[in-house]
Image: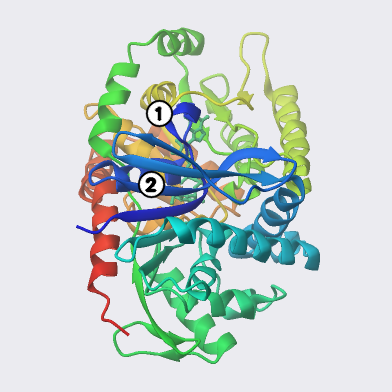
């Protein structure tokens, strides 16, 4: 079998693993675990200059090729264009989009540099799989250097429709660059369709009868590959975590109160202010719940160098203070708001302990927290998942309490419903969801993408 080469913005060699890897890193590791391969990308370190060559290390069957990013490259490519222009736009947040032409140039420059560093490491029959919005143009840059490999691209975020995409300055260059791939993969059919429509409406492309598109003169297959988790492993982790010291302490601290739980990177796509407002609304509209419930939100700081994220942090601090100030009793703190990260194992135990999992992003490619929450539940006494209709996961987990995350009253009502739901209904909803989560594992996702890439007709 051909070697798989994966490129993603951030690479975490075993030496740099913190037990806090996000969904993408877990998925990439899974993709390379069985047959081995090469993982290429940024080391996570900011240096004076971006070096010309990658640092190579090996662990088991995986070879890691990483490079540091120079200060200016990091500021323009990562903080600038990727996270201040692309991320908000891809999440339909036009009002948050900031654009600087110098950042766009930096983004293209880093992708070119990545291509020049990766190209000499490629063998002719390698299969190349490029991940996420940081690296849209990497395939085209590799092609420009002569790479003829089979190349696929997977976008972990949503993809917006043409009217939204058109707001992004230089969008044409970006969409054009996707023409270099043999396969473009998305989380949901809606995202895939938006991509096809953008190619046609914004880049003179053409719909093909097999669901692909003709873009920049090349045919690109387009597919939907909803990412999953290793549900059985997560369930085992949650079972073990239930007996851990942290979980015992959490249980004691709750003194019999029901736990509402959320964990998200501190990101404006996750709908945290609306979630806090909804909890306030629960306590004001359903006063019986006061003193009987505790909401714990874990939100590790993310992208703290981007101004919109710093502003969000201030907003949440103010909301948390207001809620606790308004409702707290001398023996009850309604909201526990934590900015620090926890290990996956501890999180798994917290999911299992909670009566409600709150997953209410305003827009999300998939949202793995929703799937982890389901996998962590105790079959005899499962909790209730409240899930945004705008998370990709809502397509599969339609047995959750589905809410519009902009409607704080609807979230508050769903919380009250979840807190008072019968055990029979909780079990029925959970059974429907765990079946879906188990049926679409991360290894299934890897196999489906690589099989589709392999099956792309030549030319
Ligand atoms: C992108 C897309 C898509 C969170 N806090 C801690 C922690 N986490 C873990 C969660 C989960 C992961 O991070 C977050 O994954 P999500 O899918 O929820 O969200 P993004 O980070 O935005 O991921 C998303 C995903 O890519 C995969 O394609 O689903 O839509 O935006 O695994 O558990 N993990 C640890 N400590 C924390 O404090 N250990």
Q: How is the image coloured?
A: rainbow
Residue 116 in sight from this viewpoint: yes
Which dot marks residue 28? 2
Q: Residue at x 65, y 35 (%)?
A: 280
Looking at the image, residue 388 lies above or below residue 197: above
Element type at mark 1: helix
| Near-viewer residue (218 or 227) | 218
The percent position of residue 35, horizontal first and vertical second, equals 23, 47
| Near-viewer residue (85 or 74) | 74
Q: Is residue 85 left or right of residue 194?
A: right
The percent position of residue 320, horizontal first and vertical second, equals 70, 30
The percent position of residue 169, horizontal first and vertical second, equals 72, 75
Residue 441 in sight from this viewpoint: no
Which dot marks residue 351? 1
Q: Is residue 329 left or right of residue 63?
A: right
> Which of the two labelled residues, at mark 1 and mark 2, occupies the earlier sequence position?
2
């Amino acid at each position: 079998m051909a070697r798989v080469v994966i490129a993603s913005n951030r690479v975490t060699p075993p030496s740099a693993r913190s037990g806090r890897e996000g969904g993408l890193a877990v998925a990439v590791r899974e993709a390379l675990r069985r047959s081995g391969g090469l993982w290429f990308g940024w080391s996570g370190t900011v240096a004076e200059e971006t070096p010309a060559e990658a640092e190579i290390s090996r662990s088991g069957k995986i070879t890691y090729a990483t490079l540091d990013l120079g200060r200016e490259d990091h500021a323009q490519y990562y903080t600038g264009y990727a996270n201040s222009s692309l991320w908000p736009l891809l999440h339909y947040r036009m009002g948050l989009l900031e654009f600087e032409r110098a950042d766009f140039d930096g983004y293209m420059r880093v992708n070119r540099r990545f291509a020049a560093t990766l190209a000499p490491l490629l063998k002719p029959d390698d299969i190349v799989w490029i991940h996420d919005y940081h690296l849209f143009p990497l395939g085209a840059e590799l092609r420009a250097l002569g790479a003829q490999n089979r190349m696929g691209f997977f976008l972990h975020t949503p993809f917006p429709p043409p009217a939204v995409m058109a707001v992004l300055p230089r969008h044409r260059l970006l969409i054009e660059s996707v023409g270099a791939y043999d396969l473009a993969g998305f989380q949901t059919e809606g995202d895939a369709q938006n991509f096809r429509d953008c190619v046609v409406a914004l880049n003179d492309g053409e719909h093909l009868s097999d669901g692909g598109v003709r873009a920049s003169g090349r045919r690109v297959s387009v597919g939907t590959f909803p990412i999953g988790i290793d549900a059985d492993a997560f369930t085992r982790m949650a079972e073990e975590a239930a007996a851990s010291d942290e979980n015992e302490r959490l249980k004691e601290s709750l003194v019999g109160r029901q736990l509402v739980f959320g964990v998200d990177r501190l990101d404006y796509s996750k709908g945290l202010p609306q979630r806090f407002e909804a909890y306030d609304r629960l306590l004001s509209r359903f006063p019986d719940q006061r003193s009987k419930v505790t909401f714990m939100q874990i939100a590790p700081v993310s992208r703290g160098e981007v101004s919109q994220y710093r502003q969000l942090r201030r907003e949440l601090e103010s909301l948390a203070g207001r809620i606790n100030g308004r409702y707290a009793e001398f023996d009850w703190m309604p909201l526990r708001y934590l900015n620090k990260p926890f290990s996956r194992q501890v999180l798994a135990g917290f999911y299992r302990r909670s009566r409600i999992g709150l997953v209410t992003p305003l827009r999300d490619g998939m949202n793995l927290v929703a799937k982890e929450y389901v996998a962590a539940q105790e079959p005899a006494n499962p909790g209730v998942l409240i899930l945004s209709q705008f998370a990709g996961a809502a397509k599969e987990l339609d047995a959750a309490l589905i809410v519009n995350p902009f409607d704080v009253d609807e979230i508050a009502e769903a919380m009250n419903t979840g807190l008072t739901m019968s055990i029979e209904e909780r079990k029925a909803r959970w059974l429907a969801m765990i079946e879906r989560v188990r049926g679409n594992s991360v290894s299934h996702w890897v196999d489906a993408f690589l099989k589709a890439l392999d099956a792309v007709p030549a030319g």
